[in-house]
Image (cartoon, rainbow, N blue to C red):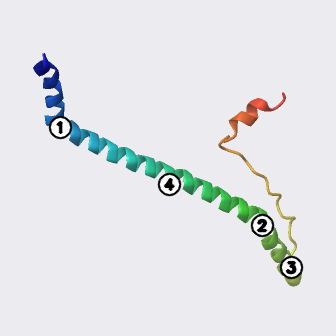
Amino acid sequence: MIDQLSQPMREFIDSNWWTFTLTFAVQFALFVRWLYRRVRNDELMRAFIQDMATNHLPHIYELLDKMCDRQGIERSPPPPIRWLELADNDRRARFLRPR
């Protein structure tokens, strides 16, 4: 009886399962690391673009206006900053909004 129960365990230990398990674990860890870096990079890029638009563009347009005034160039008013949310990250808020 004990031989019958220990036989599958010996096959498991002696087989190539350890190689498969280790390879799978390493590949999964690398995938999770890649996914985390990609998400983090997207967050940093979004924060950079938002900072550029809200803090720096108004100053750039102000300096361009001064240069145009100094050189006598007619200019159009600066465009308003509008945000387009292409990826709806806050889906919960969409369901909570009154209709």
Write down the quadrant of residue 57 in the picture. Answer: bottom right
Depth check: give the residue in front, 76 or 95. Answer: 95
Q: Nearer the viewer, mark 4 or mark 1?
A: 1
| Upstream in sequence: badge 1 or badge 3 | 1
- According to the image, label 2 marks what residue? 55
Image x and y of residue 66, in percent: 86, 79
Of the numbered discs 4 and 2, the one sitting upstream in the chain is 4
- Residue 66's label in the rendered image is 3
Q: Is residue 43 above or below residue 27?
A: below
User: Where residue 35 sits: x, y (%)?
Assistant: 48, 48
Give the farthest residue toward the top: 1
Q: Earlier in the sequence, mark 4 or mark 1?
A: 1
Q: CA distance from mark 4 to mark 2?
A: 26 Å
Q: Mark 4: few, some, or many residues within 10 Å (few <14, many ≥20)?
A: few
**First reached walking from the N terminus: tag 1 or tag 2:** 1
Q: Residue at x 31, y 41 (%)?
A: 24
Which residue carries the number 1 mark? Answer: 16
Please state which of residues 62 and 77 is positioned toward the viewer in this rendering.
62
Give percent across and percent down for residue 73.
86, 77
For the C terminus, the image quarter is top right
Of tags 1 and 3, which is closer to the observer? 1
Q: Are marks 4 and 3 in contact (CB under 8 Å)?
A: no
Q: Crowding at label 3, few (<14), some or many (≥20) Cα neighbours within 10 Å?
A: few
**Element at badge 1?**
loop
User: What residue is shown with label 4?
Assistant: 37
**Distance between the alpha carbons at the discs numbered 1 and 3:** 73 Å
Residue at x-position 86% and y-position 70%: 75
